[in-house]
Amino acid sequence: MSPSGSRIPAPAARGSAVAEVDTPALLIDLDTLDANMAQVHQHVIAAGLHVRAHGKAHKCPAIAHRQLAAGAIGICCQKASEAEIFADAGITDILITNQVVGINKVERVAILANRVTLGVCVDHALQVDQLGSAATRHGSKISVMIEVDVGLGRCGVSSAEAALMLAAQIGTFAPALTLGGIHAYTGSAQHLREPAEREAAVAAAVERVTAIKWALESAGFPCPTVTGAGTGTYMLEAASSLYTEVQPGSYVLMDADYAANHLPDGAVPLQHALFGLCTVISASPTHAVLDGGLKTFATDHGLPVIMVPGWTVKGLSDEHCVIVPDAGAAPLQVGDKVRLIPGHCDPTVNLHDWLVAIRGEQVEELWPVLARGALF
Ligand code: PLP
Ligand code: MN
């Protein structure tokens, strides 16, 4: 292991030129990262809400610390092991935006809750029972968020009755468990391309959650926090008068899929801060080949987009990316280094041990992706 905890040596040295970075690598443009963060945080905070940035996008404590320094109140994680890694790196307020099931996991989560302020989502009595028993045994406190399905068709209860039963059950585990409020993530709205489609989806979610929150509070179960939202909709939740915090993740990095969302008139687009850097390892008159394939770029939301004018990504295999020129495109030479915008940032970052943080054409910092592969 290198001193940073990564098994793999960093692809560059601090202070070196970007042109010297070994490939394939992921670059983070620091000026853009900071600008994206400032833009989103300022908007959300001005609307009177909190930012709880999602760590699943970058899996990198160095970025989480930057988000906290820029006004986020805490972070979200998707997995217990991810939360442990961020906690080890000094993050003290974490919401696991997911269901944690199984005695081993719940045990770890209950222990973690003695070190950090911790929230966990539930949508079933078994989860509450496991969390409540473990937290009671360990003398820790967990803030439990009742997840409401707002159209994603993933986790979450669909009725006020189900929410009321969970709230009552959470109460039986006091003081180990407290009801934190409602988690309602409008996941299926994030990549709807048109602003009006996203607006309608979030409006429907707000209506559903408002009714469930009213039912809970009328029955004596206050819901101080309503949390959700991602990069595609955070402005809508921020304007809702219902949500109290938003949890965007991709906004700091951006990707080709998010860039394809159309924005409302006057909205300032977030910029790409994450790039793959690859080397041309073979070139012919018809195509060129890069040294990064499916093990460098996730393609579930589309192919990466090459930033060389006149060239297009044709396809990826495990370790190769084939690119093709338009008529008249300037040829690429073996040894050239080129940048690509990943199709989907989260699973792309999870393929890499290092993020090479650059300013202009210089490497400023090397960040290990410490929560890479933290899936359990
Ligand atoms: N919250 C939850 C529960 C999520 O699953 C995700 C991403 O999938 C996010 C927030 C962040 O979304 P995004 O990266 O699209 O901003
Ligand atoms: Mn994503």
Image (spheres, rainbow, N blue to C red):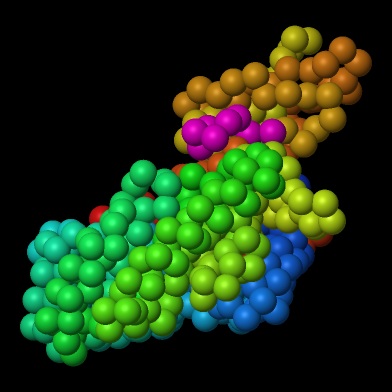
Q: Quadrant of the N terminus?
A: bottom left
Extreme-top residue of the structure: 286
x and y, in percent, of residue 327 in the image: 87, 12
Q: Would residue 216 be counted in the magenta stretch?
A: no
- Residue 45 falls left or right of residue 248: right
Q: Residue at x 73, y 17 (%)?
A: 324
The C terminus appears in which quarter of the rendering?
A: bottom left
Residue 160 lies in what quarter of the image? bottom left
Q: Which residues are magenta?
A: 298-305
Residue in the foreground of this view, choosing between 216 and 13? 216
Q: Position of residue 169 (x, y in %)?
A: 15, 74
Residue 336 position in % (x across, y down): 76, 33
Residue 303 sits inside the magenta stretch: yes
Q: Residue at x 59, y 67 (%)?
A: 240
Residue 138 in picture, x, y percent from top left: 13, 84
Can residue 358 be seen in this snapshot? no
State whether residue 249 is above or below residue 344.
below
- Residue 103, by quadrant, is bottom left
Question: Is residue 52 or residue 123 the one in the foreground?
Answer: 123
